[in-house]
Image (cartoon, rainbow, N blue to C red):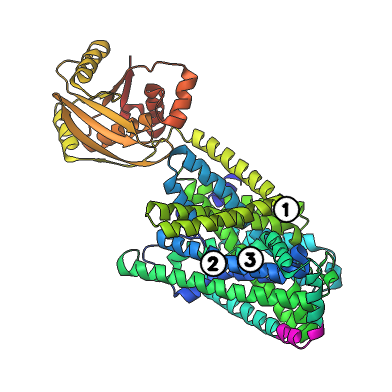
Amino acid sequence: MRDTCRSWLLEGTGDRVARQPGPHRQVPTEHDGHPWWKVVCLTGVDYFSTLGYQPAIAFLAAGVISPIATLVLVLVTLFGALPVYRRVARESPHGEGSIAMLEKVLPWWGGKLFVLVLLGFAATDFLITMTLSAADAAKHALENPYVPQFLEGHQLGVTLLLLAALGAVFLRGFREAIGVAVVLVVVFLGLNAVVVVDAVAHVVGQPVSVERWWEAVLAQGSSPWAVLGAALIVFPQLALGLSGFETGVLVMPQIEGTNSGRGLADRIAGARRLLTVAAIVMSTFLLASSLATSVLIPAQEFEPGGEANGRALAYLAHEYLGNVVGTAYDVSTIAILWFAGASAMAGLLNLVPRYLPRYGMAPEWARAVRPLVLVFTAVAFLVTWIFDADVDAQGGAYATGVLVLITSATVAVTLSAHRAGERRARAFFATVTVVFTYTTVANVVERPEGAKIAACFILGIVTVSLVSRARRAFELRASGVEFDEVAQAFLDEATARGALHVVANEPDARDEAEYAAKWYDERRDQHIPADEPVVFLEVTVADASEFETDLRVRGEERFGHRVLTVRSSAVANSIAAVALAVRDRTGVLPDVWFEWSEGNPLANIVRFLFLGSGEVAPVTREVLRRAEPDPGTRPRVHAG
């Protein structure tokens, strides 16, 4: 029974994970793609679905000045975030996103740790998308007049039920149908258009209500400029209305076009149209809905327990269009919010394998779908319980994850413009970076729960990653081994005599004296027969923070000695991989010779884990032992 359960849980590989639907899905090379206007719906299930709760959260944050604060948000969207992500689309046309752009700028361990921190904020973004969407879907369901009365007061239970259903679907197997996203988005936006247009018509027809609203706005400050200043202060709390940009770039591989040439240019152009259209559509709905809800809905209805809390547009739908249209709006909202949660779950399932296995920072079970689904569902349960399925309470955490990702994107494009020598673009993007940095800091100060949740995710990711990296340190860590013609000739000539002695040499001066001394010491101390060939093997650590590398072995003759050179992330693992490749290629079992490393053993372990060097001889032997269980076919390791 235990083995059956384990087999079921671990069924599926990294390839299967990569095929999960959602913004991070890795599309196969033969994928033809979809028109950009269809792919915008994949962004839309996350981006547009926020209309279900954004107007209500905006009013709670900004009060009667929420339409003005929303106007500030729209200006930042159209003239800040949109240009940034249009540049990101150009710089990362294969859907890598801004995280990958920064990864290239920051090499070594600093870059890896920075990416892990950003993954913590991305996890906050996706997980809060799941929990917030489920909580708001539950709220729409429970506030509907046709729902049975016995469900009243069970917001937490219904939310957990929706999250459990989401996890069950992914445990069973979830296949993407972009047509579902298209239908959901078209129906949802259509119903929102009906509700918003009707509400705006009522606003126009009630000038007295507009006057009362404007008087309440002016009461917030001594002048219109003071009101604008107040709006600038509170608009960061509305920032969850920016949630679709990172996703909009990451869905680029779904857009029709090839991965090179003219097809790639068409894909980039399609992605930029996608971002522009999504931003304009969302900005229009945000402005109109914020104005209509602020004017038409009594302020007390936005408070916890009020009928408009977390569902302002649904309130207007029921109030002005009747319960039939209101119920249709509720059903559409529940559907798109649930699908937004599914997209977020799929994004997590693709985000983890995209980075962590490449860093050697994911346990083996993370390559399978079902264990990850169970982990993410359990965390979603915990977050929902902590926030008591409260839509308003989760808004700050959601906004924090969104804002940190956008701020990182502004930094990435600023650095890109700087490297390209584009002074005007650099100045513009630097200004946008300042705006989003202020927005992020203001949001964290006002609602620190988002930073606290992100810190928990970051701590968890970093801890699991480093433990996993240490546990996987004795793997071969070579994606492949290739020998150039000279190296192959050295091996063929040496193994023709039935023996091959590989002397590990740490490359220093690489002059004649170094090789002569090494050759003499090894012959004397290790008693290598004088008539048997010796080949030096030198490993240079290029970037020790990388985990798996493709080994390219080059041969060269230096001062009468035959030398094989290779660049990699770890000395001992690469020597083991090359020794096994030599055995497989030549059929001769090589003898590998080392000198014992000097220094403190603990310090050498740390050097091995973080710098790729350290105690080479015993580590090489341990890597070989794990890679080749049969001692009779394992390359022999000697140290002296």
The residue that appears at 79% across and 86% down in the rendered structure is: 206
In the rendered image, residue 33 lying in the magenta stretch gets the answer no
Q: Which residue lies furthest to the top in this view?
A: 524
Residue indicated by mark 3? 241
Q: Quadrant of the C terminus?
A: top left
* Position of 349 relative to 75 (above/below): above
Q: Give the range drawn in magenta.
A: 198-208
* Position of 111 relative to 498 (above/below): below
Residue indicated by mark 1? 446
Q: x%, y% of residue 345?
A: 59, 59
Residue indicated by mark 2? 79
Q: x%, y% of residue 535?
A: 21, 26
Between the C-alphas of marks 2 and 3, the distance is 15 Å
Q: x%, y% of residue 320?
A: 78, 85
* SS at badge 2: helix
| Amino acid identity at mark 2 | Phe
| Amino acid identity at mark 1 | Glu
Q: Is residue 373 visible?
A: no
Label 2 with label 1: CB-CB less than 8 Å: no
In the displayed structure image, the side of residue 585 where residue 365 appears, left or right: right
Q: Nearer the viewer, mark 2 or mark 3?
A: 2
Between the C-alphas of marks 2 and 1, the distance is 25 Å
In the displayed structure image, the side of residue 571 where residue 277 appears, left or right: right
In the rendered image, residue 206 lying in the magenta stretch gets the answer yes
